[in-house]
Amino acid sequence: MTDIERKILRHSLGLDGKTKRSYRNRFCAGPGTDSYPHCEALVSAGFMDKRPSDNPSSGLSIYYVTAAGQDALVKEPKLPPH
């Protein structure tokens, strides 16, 4: 897992370095955004699931961290808060 992918998982779960408890599980991205290829890689790895947005015309998808993604994040080295 890359540093960027780890940051996406942490952000998706609301883990910003100030809290140790997750308070959300979602990340929005779409084609043309910087995070889109990383989210797609996380889906391919089984670390995220992807669902279409409630607003299909936005072109965005909503990504959710899976249990495997949460486990992988716990096992990865810690990043400094951003």
Image (tube, rainbow, N blue to C red):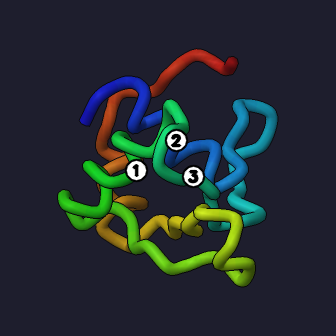
* Amino acid on which the number 3 mark rests in the picture: Ala
Q: In the drawing, does residue 58 fall left or right of residue 48?
A: right
| On-image quarter of the C terminus | top right
Image coordinates of residue 23 in percent, x first then y, are: 77, 63
Is 52 above or below relative to 7? Answer: below
Alpha carbon distance from label 3 to label 2:
11 Å
Residue drawn at 44 percent across, 73 percent down: 50
Say whether disc 3 or disc 1 marks the residue closer to the N-terminus. 3
Q: Which residue is mark 2?
A: 8
Is 48 above or below relative to 1? Answer: below
Q: Nearer the viewer, residue 40 or 4?
A: 40
* Amino acid on which the number 2 mark rests in the picture: Ile
Q: Are marks 2 and 1 in contact (CB under 8 Å)?
A: yes
Is 64 above or below relative to 34? Answer: below
Is 51 above or below relative to 80? Answer: below
Q: Which residue is mark 1?
A: 39
Residue drawn at 50 percent across, 48 percent down: 9
Q: Which residue is mark 3?
A: 29
Which circle, 3 or 1, is nearer the viewer? 3
Q: Secondary structure at mark 2?
A: helix
